[in-house]
Image: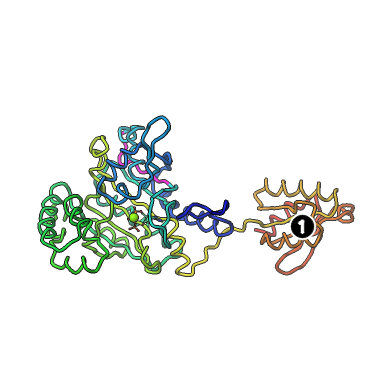
């Protein structure tokens, strides 16, 4: 193995492409920051029970994908495989739910870890931006989150994504449905693993990607027919609010999602240009999660959008984001005196908010101009002894090639004006 090889299932973000990832994170966060969500950051690892209880022992995430380990002190920890359980844990620990201002609305951005089979769009280390609205049961809150994710994707220029929507019922109606589904599934020809799943997490079987399984699922009882009146009315209102907001969605009665804690509203964002790893984000209501991890009843709703797959979706649609220029002005000094003067000028430009860079390493004119070109700068500042004697620097427009002397004392203003 080469020393320079990143671990399997991981990759590095490297300029200039890393700028796209940064812009995606910012685009997803912007509508949240603008809608009353406050930023939260939690540790990269937690006590393992938080996830085994919160995400659920029966999920793939906990049973197969979690990086769990014991510390030298004997504490059992896990790298976080997702954000919701941690955010809720942190909100409970800080007593945010007791401040009399529900829902508590939070957003986050960070790295997540799952031991998966690496493939395009599926990594062992990936990044999400997420949002959680904790402590309120209100269909408008579910709608708000879906609308904000839709707004985020649209602001990036994405068009080929779809929103899949379903209701998973609540603690009244879901158990009745679960029983009916188990009865149906037990009569099918299924492998041992799937049979075990009938007993621990039967809804997930609806999501099985194998044709042989899907064929047998025709005629399976559907949750929609088992929803209680309260769940039906709730779901209907979410749908109406989305429609009124002009957000298009598809009812998908088979959408169950991989986590145990979801109730009622469940949704997924899929992108049609991504092949089999098509889910760019997902989320839903998780009214029972707080109690599952030992907290009070706190009905909540949230989502997490995958940053890596959103970047892939941009590529699939051929979208090039307009990223702010990393360098507007590049300074090329000729000689020692010019080096001191231009370095000072670059510092001044930066303090004035102009993106500026400098030719380091004592390069000659040719090498330095190459660096200026590579930097993508709009202007190059060149100065030699003769210019300094005249109190000017040469400002070269990199597009037209035109070169104009500007007075050194006025250079910052002159450059700012031209860039504006
Ligand atoms: P999938 O069905 O593709 O495994 P998931 O249901 O496990 O997705 P969530 O737990 O809902 O995914 O996470 C939300 C989003 O995070 C996903 O829609 C996806 O964009 C991203 N994501 C999840 N797992 C990975 C991964 N291993 N690599 C890259 N992105 C991921
Ligand atoms: Mg998964």
Q: Is residue 191 left or right of residue 1?
A: left
Relative to 250, is 160 on the left or the right?
A: right
If the image is split into quadrants, where does the C terminus sit? bottom right
Mark 1 CB within 8 Å of ligand 1: no
- Residue reaching furthest top? 73
What is the crowding at mark 1: few (fewer than 14 residues within 10 Å), some, or many (at least 20)?
many
**Foreground pick, 402 / 81:** 81
Left or right relative to 82: residue 180? left
In the image, residue 105 lies at what x, y percent?
35, 43
Residue 207: percent from left, percent from top: 24, 60
Q: Mark 1 falls on what kind of element?
A: strand
Read off the residue under disc 1: 381
Residue drawn 58% across the image and 59% down it: 16
In terms of image quadrants, where is residue 329?
bottom right
What stretch of residues is rendered in magenta? 100-108
| Colouring mode (rainbow / by chain / secondary structure / one colour) | rainbow
Q: Position of residue 302 (x, y in %)?
A: 32, 49
| Magenta stretch contains residue 103 | yes
Please give the name of the residue rendered at 13% of the width and 63% of the height, measured from the top-left corner.
188
**Residue 285 versus residue 18: which sits nearer the camera?**
18
Q: Residue at x 70, y 68 (%)?
A: 399
Residue 255 versus residue 275: which sits nearer the camera?
A: 275
Does residue 191 appear to the left or right of 64 in the view shown? left
Question: For the view shown, which residue lies furthest in the front direction?
Answer: 1
Residue 213 at x, y percent in the picture: 21, 65
Q: Residue at x 24, y 64 (%)?
A: 251
Along the viewing direction, whichever of 212 and 275 lies nearer the viewer: 212
Instruction: Assess whether residue 189 is covered by the magenta stretch.
Output: no
């Amino acid at each position: 193995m080469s020393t320079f090889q990143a671990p399997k299932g991981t990759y590095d973000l490297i300029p200039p492409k890393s700028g796209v990832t940064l812009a995606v994170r910012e685009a997803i966060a912007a509508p949240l920051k603008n809608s009353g969500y406050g930023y939260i950051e939690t540790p990269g690892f937690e006590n393992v029970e938080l996830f085994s209880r919160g995400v659920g022992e029966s999920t793939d995430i906990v049973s197969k994908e979690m990086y769990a380990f014991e510390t030298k002190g004997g504490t059992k920890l896990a790298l976080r495989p997702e954000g919701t359980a941690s955010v809720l844990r942190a909100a409970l620990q800080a007593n945010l739910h007791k401040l009399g201002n529900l829902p508590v609305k939070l957003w986050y951005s960070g790295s997540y870890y799952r031991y998966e089979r690496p493939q395009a769009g599926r990594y062992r280390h990936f990044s999400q931006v997420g949002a959680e609205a904790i402590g309120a049961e209100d269909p408008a809150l579910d709608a708000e989150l879906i609308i904000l994710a839709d707004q985020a994707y649209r602001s990036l220029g994405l068009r080929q994504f779809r929103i899949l929507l379903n209701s998973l019922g609540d603690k009244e109606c879901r158990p009745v449905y679960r029983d009916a589904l188990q009865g149906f599934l037990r009569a099918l020809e299924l492998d041992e693993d799937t049979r075990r799943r009938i007993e621990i997490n039967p809804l997930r079987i609806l999501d099985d990607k194998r044709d042989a399984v899907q064929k047998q699922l025709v005629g399976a009882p559907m949750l929609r027919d088992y929803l209680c009146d309260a769940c039906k009315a709730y779901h209907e209102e979410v749908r109406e609010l989305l429609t009124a907001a002009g957000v298009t969605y598809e009812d998908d009665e088979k959408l169950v999602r991989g986590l145990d804690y979801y109730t009622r509203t469940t949704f997924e964002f899929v992108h049609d240009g991504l092949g089999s790893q098509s889910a760019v984000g997902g989320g839903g209501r998780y009214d029972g999660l707080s109690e599952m991890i030992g907290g009070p009843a706190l009905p909540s709703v949230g989502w997490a959008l995958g940053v890596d797959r959103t970047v892939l979706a941009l590529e699939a649609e051929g979208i090039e984001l307009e990223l702010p220029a990393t360098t507007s002005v590049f300074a090329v000094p000729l000689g020692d005196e010019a080096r001191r003067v231009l370095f000072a000028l670059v510092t001044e430009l930066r303090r004035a908010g102009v993106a500026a860079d400098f030719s380091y390493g004592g390069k000659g004119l040719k090498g330095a101009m190459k660096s200026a070109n590579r930097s993508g700068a709009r202007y190059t500042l060149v100065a030699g002894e003769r210019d300094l004697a005249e109190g000017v620097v040469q400002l070269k427009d990199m597009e037209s090639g035109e070169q104009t002397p500007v007075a050194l004392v006025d250079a910052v203003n002159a450059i700012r004006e031209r860039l504006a």
